Image: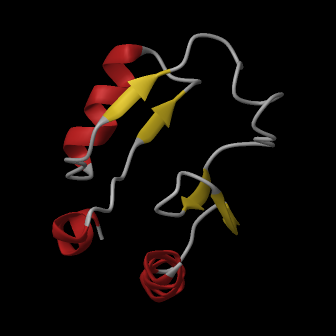
Amino acid sequence: MWRDYRSKGVVVLGVDSEDFTGDARSFMREHGITYPVVREQGRDLYGPYGVSGVPETRVIDRRGKYAGTQFYGATTVSDLRRSVQTALRS
């Protein structure tokens, strides 16, 4: 998804909040993750951003606003693609 849409200004950012750094890096290598991933210390995202668990995916529009789409757990490429295309039109 990131490779398909980055030329349209889409940014994909992963947040790792529960793993040891080495484990997270191994996971990224094993799954071919090439988008940026930042490490959260503690659970600061859980309160102010309403994150309820991991994994969770949110789509943010061009204005930086929550586009009303989020996925809990795994999602399909088609659902995520549809959500990104909707956000790009906003």
Q: Residue at x 43, y 41 (%)?
A: 14
Residue 78 spot, x, y in % from top left: 46, 89
Q: Residue at x 50, y 87 (%)?
A: 82
**Quadrant of the image occupied by residue 49:** top right
Residue 44 spot, x, y in % from top left: 71, 19
Scheme by which the image is coloured: secondary structure
Residue 40 spot, x, y in % from top left: 54, 19
Disc count in the image?
Answer: 0
Q: Residue at x 39, y 44 (%)?
A: 13
| Left or right of residue 51: residue 30 | left
| Left or right of residue 22: residue 90 | right
User: Is residue 6 shown above or below 44?
Assistant: below
Residue 76 spot, x, y in % from top left: 50, 80
User: Is residue 4 shown above or below 30?
Assistant: below
Question: Depth check: 3 or 64 in front?
Answer: 64
Question: Depth check: 8 or 45 in front?
Answer: 8
Q: Residue furthest top?
A: 41
Q: Considering the image in quadrants, where does the N terminus appear?
A: bottom left
| Left or right of residue 6: residue 23 | right
Q: Residue at x 24, y 71 (%)?
A: 8
User: Is residue 75 shown above or below 65?
Assistant: below
| Left or right of residue 5: residue 48 | right
